Image: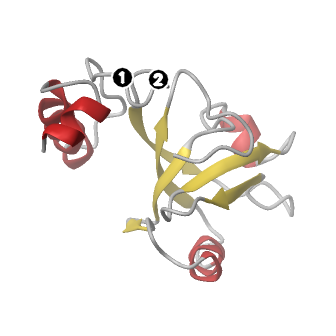
Amino acid sequence: SSGINAEYGGSNFASCLQASLKSLIENTAFIKGCVEVKNRGCPTFERITLQPDGDTGWGFSFRETSSGIYIVKRILQNTPADKSGRIKSGDEVIEVNEQNIVGWKIKNVVELIRSRPTGLVMVVRHYPDPLPDNKEE
């Protein structure tokens, strides 16, 4: 455990994780007071609901890291993701339609996103400092 604490900023990691999980359970929009994670700043979680807007699709693309995390790469203009103003490049997508997608195969994630054309609900983890291109955690 001492390796985890050192890597994530000391003994406050456990309390940060506990606060994050409590917030998700209570469906609170943001978590504050967390310790920095790998020099990216303090993460916050947000539940985001997107509504379809014509035939534009949802308007974001993502990539999978070697650890099974999905990171938003790009937001297309004039799409539900763009108009929401709440999804940013570098955000980590944790849940889609109430399913934890960490570790899923990308084809299954895409299928899940496409399975609900009337609305999309995601939980994303925001960082103040985005992950540089071509870098993984």
Find residue 81 and report its image quarter.
Answer: top right
Quarter of the image with the N terminus is top left
Q: Residue 58 at what x, y percent from top left?
A: 73, 57
**Which residue in the protein does label 1 denote?**
36
- The residue positioned farthest toward the front in the image shown: 3
Count neighbours of disc 2 (C-alpha within 10 A) and say few if under 14, some if 14 to 19, many if 20 or more: some
Q: How is the image coloured?
A: secondary structure
Determine whether, in the image, residue 17 is placed left or right of residue 108.
left
Instruction: Work out whether residue 108 can be spotted.
Output: yes
Rendered image: mark on residue 39: 2
Query: Mark 2 near mark 1, Cβ–Cβ under 8 Å?
Result: yes
Is residue 116 shown above or below 43?
below
Rendered image: mark on residue 21: none
Nearer-the-camera pick, 119 or 67: 67
Is residue 72 shown above or below 46?
below
Determine whether, in the image, residue 129 is placed left or right of residue 96.
right
Is residue 130 shown above or below 20?
above
Q: Residue 57 at what x, y percent from top left?
A: 79, 62
Q: Residue at x 80, y 47 (%)?
A: 79
Nearer-the-camera pick, 130 or 120: 130
Count neighbours of disc 1 (C-alpha within 10 A) and say few if under 14, some if 14 to 19, many if 20 or more: some
For the residues marked 2 and 1, what is the alpha-carbon distance in whole angstroms?
6 Å
